[in-house]
Image (cartoon, coloured by chain):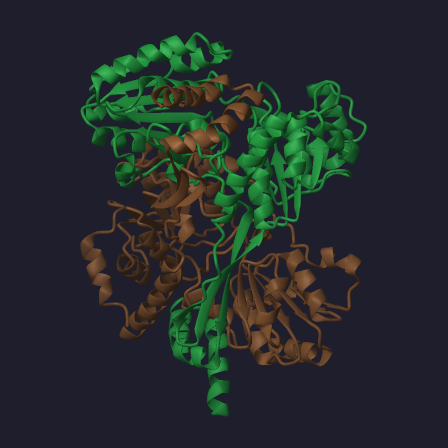
Chain colours: A brown, B green
């Protein structure tokens, strides 16, 4: 715990400095995987699945039979919970659809945008310490709503060659078109180049370890888009005296349990409440199954006591958190102070885990200060917006001279000529 | 000219193959520039300005005085033209503002998005064969509308240390906050790291040569976002018998004159019209000032005669053009056939140069088949959309169990606990 009381403004920038990640240089290793998969397809995938996942995979494609079988393995309570989360995520992401809005910018010049789903998208779901079926909901639901035609999912198998059943269940429920038992950088390479079994996609989504992250970056060099750059998960909590120490401590810990490199920042303007929250945090920490991870994350985290809430918001904007919790009175009145954040949770009952699972917002969000320039995943992430224009004879008459003058000033005479020919034809026919 | 008549479907993919760009490996050179600029700031910029632009620059910042001086150098006709273009671009991009739409996904669970302008953005405007002041309009106008606070612009100076006056005029007109006389990869490095004179930015926009493009890619490794990957400009024209050969030829040439590597694809279902357009093209080509560039581009370009318009759209979607012109009857009825394109021009009077300059749509568009996964620049490119949620006591009671079950199924007990504590408190107080 790094506790700072009433820091000077000149120190704020240092306080919100993220620890430099020791980014291993994995590029040459991943480049080898990419080269092998691009040349040898499924055979290379088999080689790496054995090497990295100790799994011998005959057919990477999950069969209809396997999907049917898992349905009986999921409890009814979990199915009901997934259904409520799915419904909320659908409602919120469907509300992001943009109606077509035709704008006449000049008489006879009509411009608009139409959305099209990206035809082929790939979702990567890691296995590891937690089976992130919630991320399947967060990525497959907007992909389906966007109208993506092929939605493929890759997830690493266990040593028996199986994918976590809840991941399979949710993928099927949300309309994933094909599921493949392959993980790591080899899965990203497969979706980048395509293999005999796995389709090439146009955009890859989803979290992953350093191998997967480096592979996604490499995929962009081969013309495949990715959702966003990845870093460890983060929360920043701003709380005042009306907040509840137990709730704040629980929210900080729910972030910390993600991993030892999780980032937690706590800012308050009230000393008594500040101390109470620290005590609550220490006591709640003791009972967590993932105590070791959370404890390490908390060790490196910032607890800052400030003079007033305005300072708190300035520090938060400097940090640009992935998750921002405002446990303050009349929290909604303060939102205009927020310049940089991924997703914001207002008041004492909007806990981060609501947004992580079930309220409807997306949990794939910009980390590592990328909320300064990136939005989280939304329906838009699975769409392209194509601009259209329809210019009538009257329209080009109104606009033609302007285009001619500008094209000539840029020295682009063929651009000018395309207009001049049209204006001449219209004048001749009048 | 590569002319293909009635190709088999199996050949389409080859027809739309873009020539492999000989991407020089500039990475080590650019890495050196980045390293030098990050360490030595303005001094490094001075070194590279002298080396690459033969310009000795004392102060990179364009002064108020220089900006005032250029105003008298721009003709009134050009000022009026720029004003009409600006007005149309403003109208269309302002129409892209998203109203706040609060959605109650479950009773007591309210979710919405709010937009915030990216606080600091950088615009790069090349000089070279054409002074692209139109690109200043296309980038500075949406930046200003988005509410970006710092909008800086870098453009290479000539040997006298001056930037093109129209670029300065338009930058000032559109609300660019500071203009710097620096170009090439050193300008991108300056905006990535900041120097004594030039601010660090969060996102960099704008076209450029291979040095600039490679530098923008490198900027992303240092946490700076960029508008999109860049490639040579392209147009695909689909035309039927009602189209006008002179217009189609002029549109193809207005693309071709951009550079020898410009991509032009022409598809028609009518043989007579097809031949007439080829003849028109050869004759118009003779009179162009940039004939040499256009001729080289046309040499490598595809002219395809197809059986019917449905085939034309299938080929176009495979190619995924930056610009798509539909010079066909009832063109608006065909738009649902378009899966991949950057910007679409409908009918005989919607020439590409209208969109390049003045109709209102943006001309910064995805090339090199990136329209499969990327949109062109829009207001959104200068914004982040932050999600918000406000959950009441009633809301967490309705949603709590779902979150608890899902968190437990993922093995994340601190996530569960954040909800359980709240539910317990509510139950105790009831």
Residue B42 spot, x, y in % from top left: 77, 33
**Residue drawn at point x = 60 percent, y = 63 percent:** A297
> In the rendered view, would you say A174 is above or below A276?
above
Quarter of the rendering containing residue A79: bottom left
**Residue drawn at point x = 59 percent, y = 29 percent:** B133
**Is any part of residue A158 visible from this angle?**
no
Q: Is residue B159 left or right of residue A51?
A: right
Residue A329 spot, x, y in % from top left: 61, 77
> Looking at the image, which is closer to me, B328 or B364?
B328
Screen quadrant of the N terminus of chain B: top left
Instruction: State the residue lying farthest toward the front.
Output: A430
> In the rendered view, would you say A152 is above or below B253?
below
**Residue drawn at point x = 60 percent, y = 26 percent:** B77
> Looking at the image, which is closer to me, B179 or A343?
B179
Q: Is residue A49 left or right of residue A406?
A: left
**Residue drawn at point x = 72 percent, y = 27 percent:** B72
Residue A331 spot, x, y in % from top left: 59, 72
Quarter of the rendering containing residue B84: top right
> Looking at the image, which is closer to me, A68 or A134?
A134
The number of numbered badges drawn on the structure is 0
Q: Is residue A183 left or right of residue A312?
A: left
Residue A12 spot, x, y in % from top left: 74, 59
**Is any part of residue B377 visible from this angle?**
yes
């Amino acid at each position: 715990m790094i506790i700072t009381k009433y820091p000077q403004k000149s120190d704020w920038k240092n306080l919100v400095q993220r620890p430099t990640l020791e980014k291993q240089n994995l590029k040459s290793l991943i480049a080898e995987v990419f080269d092998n998969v691009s040349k040898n397809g499924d055979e290379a995938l088999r080689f790496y699945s054995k090497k990295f996942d100790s799994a011998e995979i005959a057919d990477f494609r999950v069969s209809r039979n396997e999907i049917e079988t898992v349905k009986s393995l999921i409890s009814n309570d979990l199915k009901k919970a997934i259904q409520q989360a799915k419904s909320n995520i659908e409602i919120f992401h469907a509300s992001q659809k943009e109606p077509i809005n035709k704008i006449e910018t000049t008489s006879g010049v009509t411009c608009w945008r139409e959305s099209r789903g990206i035809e082929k998208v790939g979702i990567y779901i890691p296995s590891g310490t937690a089976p992130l079926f919630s991320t399947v909901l967060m990525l497959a639901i907007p992909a389906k709503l966007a109208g993506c035609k092929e939605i493929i999912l890759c997830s690493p198998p266990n040593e028996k060659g199986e994918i976590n059943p809840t991941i399979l269940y949710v993928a099927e429920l949300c309309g994933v078109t094909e599921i493949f038992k392959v993980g790591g950088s080899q899965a990203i390479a497969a979706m980048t180049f395509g293999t005999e079994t796995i389709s090439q996609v146009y955009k890859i989504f989803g979290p992953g370890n350093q191998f997967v992250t480096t592979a996604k970056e490499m995929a962009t060099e081969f013309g495949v888009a990715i959702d966003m750059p990845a870093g460890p998960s983060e929360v920043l909590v701003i709380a005042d005296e009306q907040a509840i120490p137990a709730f704040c401590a629980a929210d900080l810990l729910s972030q910390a349990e993600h991993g030892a490199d999780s980032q937690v920042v706590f800012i308050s303007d009230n000393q008594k409440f500040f101390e109470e929250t620290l005590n609550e945090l220490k006591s709640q920490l003791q009972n967590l199954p993932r105590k070791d991870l959370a404890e390490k994350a908390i060790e490196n985290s910032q607890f800052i006591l400030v003079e007033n809430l305005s300072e708190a918001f300035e520090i938060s904007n400097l940090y640009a958190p992935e998750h921002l919790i405002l446990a303050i009175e009349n929290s909604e009145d303060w939102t205009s102070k927020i310049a940089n954040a991924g997703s914001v949770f207002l008041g004492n009952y909007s806990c981060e885990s609501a947004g992580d699972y079930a309220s409807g917002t997306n949990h794939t969000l910009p980390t590592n200060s990328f909320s300064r320039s990136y939005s989280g995943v939304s329906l838009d992430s699975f769409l392209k917006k194509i601009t259209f224009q329809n210019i009538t004879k009257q329209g080009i008459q109104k606009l033609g001279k302007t285009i001619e003058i500008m094209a000539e000033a840029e020295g682009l005479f063929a651009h000018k000529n395309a207009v001049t020919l049209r204006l001449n034809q219209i004048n001749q026919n009048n």
